[in-house]
Amino acid sequence: MLIAFEGIDGAGKTTIVNFLKDELKKRGYNVVTFKEPTDSEWGRKIRQAFKDRSLKPEDELELFLKDREWNVKRNILPSLKAGKIVIMDRYYYSTIAYQGARGIDIERIRKLNEKFPKPDLVIILDIKPETAIRRIRQRGDVPNRFEDLEYLKRVREIFLSLKNNIVVVNAERPIEEVKREVLDIVLKHISKGLHR
C-alpha cells in the first residue's frame, strides 16, 4: 500500500509520517517512509534552487520528475513489491500544487506523473498559509521562496481542488487530535484493503 502525505510547509507532515510509521510498526505492519525531494543528485539540485531561487518553473519540474523516477525505481517499487506499506512525506501532488502555482498547467503536470505508482490513499494536512508561515518561523527557519503568503494561498487552493483517494485533514488543531484522526483514517483504509 502506498500512502502519501501532502500539504503546504508547516502543516506537520514529517511529524505525522513518523508517528504513523511507529504506530503501524507497533501493530505488526512492515512500514517504510520516504521523503521528496530525495537525497539524489536531482533532489540536491532542487533543494539548492529553493535557496538561491535560480530555476525557472519548467526546469524545476524537470528535476522533480527525474528525482521521482529515481525514488520510484530505487525505493518505492522495491518496497511495494516486498509487501511493505510505503508512506511518502510529499509525492507528486506537491509537484502539481507547487509547480502549478508557479504557472505550469496542472493537467500537464498530472499527466507527466501518471507513469509513477498511484497512491492508494492521499492525506492532505490542511492549514492556512498564515499558520504555515508562523510555524516555519517558530521552528527557527526562514521562509523560502516556496513559503511566500500569496504563493502559498495558490498552492493551498490547488491542493484542495485535487480529487481521487484524497482525504483532507484539518491540521490547524492540536497535533494529538490530528494524529488520532490520521491513524483512524489509515487503519480503516488498511482493513478495507485487506477485505477486498
Image (cartoon, rainbow, N blue to C red):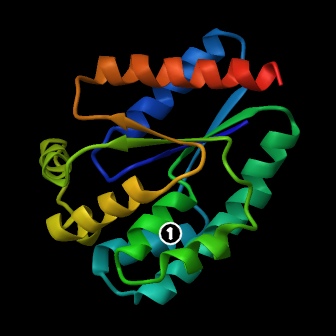
Mark 1 surroundings: few (<14), some (14-19) or many (≥20) residues within 10 A: some
Position of the C terminus by quadrant: top right
**Horizontal and vertical percent for residue 17?**
49, 33
Kindly identify the residue that appears in the image at 46 percent across and 73 percent down. Answer: 46
Position of the N terminus by quadrant: top right
Kindly identify the residue that appears in the image at 87 percent across and 41 percent down. Answer: 81
Q: Is mark 1 on a helix, strand or loop?
A: helix
**Res 115 quadrant in image:** bottom right
**Horizontal and vertical percent for residue 185?**
53, 24
Kindly identify the residue that appears in the image at 31 percent across and 42 percent down. Answer: 11
**Horizontal and vertical percent for residue 33?**
61, 38
Which residue type carries mark 1? Arg
Instruction: Name the side, left or right, on which 127 lies relative to 70.
Output: left
**Horizontal and vertical percent for residue 55?**
40, 87
* Residue situated in front as seen by the camera: 107 or 141: 107
**Res 186 quadrant in image:** top right
Q: In this view, does 61 lie above or below 184?
A: below
Most extreme residue toward the top is 27
The number of numbered discs placed on residues in the rendered structure image is 1
Kindly identify the residue that appears in the image at 34 percent across and 38 percent down. Answer: 12
The answer to whether any part of residue 63 appears in the image is no
The answer to whether any part of residue 141 appears in the image is yes
Q: Is residue 105 above or below residue 85?
A: below
Instruction: Name the side, left or right, on which 119 lies relative to 39.
Output: right
Name the residue beneath numbered marker 1. Answer: 44
* Residue situated in front as seen by the camera: 36 or 110: 110
Instruction: Name the side, left or right, on which 77 lies relative to 161.
Output: right
